[in-house]
Image (cartoon, rainbow, N blue to C red):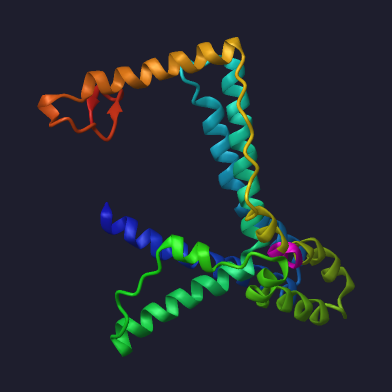
Amino acid sequence: LSRWKIFDNLRRSLEPAALLTLLLWGWLASATPLAWTLALLALLLTRPMLDSLLELLGKATDVPVSEHLLAALHTSGTCFLRAGLSLAWLPFETCYSLDAILRTLWRLGVSKQRLLQWNPSREDERCSADTLQAVYRQQWGQPALVFVLTGALAMQPTVLLIASPVLVLWLLGPALAWWLSRPSDRTALTPGTEDLVFLHRLARANWAFFDSYVGPADNWLPPDKYQEGPEPRVA
């Protein structure tokens, strides 16, 4: 299973390049650009639709229906938003993934140098662009691709019309990245009576889990999970 997960990670690293190639082929070389564009959108929307359905059907017994529906709606919106952002950043993600793949193959197969190079996430966050102009400079390849494709499709108005929503999304992709990366304002939580009852019940259930499954027999280490099916046991 672990080997399969490694293989699946390698496969997923090629997804952005494959999707971008699919779109470019549909616009530049195919006789049915609309079909290729809709096929890519279907690929991107399949997973959020399935995740939303599973979230809607997976209601816990101790959660009120209204709370479950609100949580499922929020999760569904997040899934579709992520799918839209993956399309908005598709050219940048393609360059980023291919750069990592080529660097890895070169270092493993040729140079044998810097095999343990690693940038902590905190360091990346500190060095990340913090202004709109800096983000566009960092992701300059994405708007450049938009202008190149617009010029290439100028002689095919129908194809340009089909591709224009995606091209506009790509042009705005760095701006979306900058806007989403801004520090969020903290809001004070003022729970009502029903919210407090629900939170107290949830807190009691969380405490009961540790009270039941963390003890001397387990060296006071909590288990990874407690599974209810196919039979109740600590996993």
Q: Nearer the viewer, residue 211 or 229?
A: 211
Spot occupied by residue 26 in the image (x, y as percentages of width and height): 70, 70
On screen, residue 81 versus residue 207, left or right, reads right
In this rendering, the answer to whether 187 lies above or below 42 is above
Spot occupied by residue 93 in the image (x, y as percentages of width and height): 57, 67
Spot occupied by residue 98 in the image (x, y as percentages of width and height): 50, 75
On screen, residue 228 versus residue 172, left or right, reads left
Q: Name which quarter of the figure residue 2 lies in.
A: bottom left
Q: Name which quarter of the figure residue 122 lies in.
A: bottom left
**Residue at 71% from the left image edge and 77% from the top image edge:** 145
Magenta segment's dominant SS is helix
Q: Quadrant of the C terminus?
A: top left
**Residue at 14% from the left image edge and 29% from the top image edge:** 218
On screen, residue 8 versus residue 135, left or right, reads left
Q: Is residue 151 magenta?
A: no
- The residues colored magenta run 170-174
On screen, residue 123 versus residue 80, left or right, reads left
How many numbered circles does the render carry? 0
In this rendering, the answer to whether 107 lies above or below 100 is below
Spot occupied by residue 79 in the image (x, y as percentages of width and height): 59, 43
**Residue at 56% from the left image edge and 22% from the top image edge:** 68
In this rendering, the answer to whether 81 lies above or below 11 is above
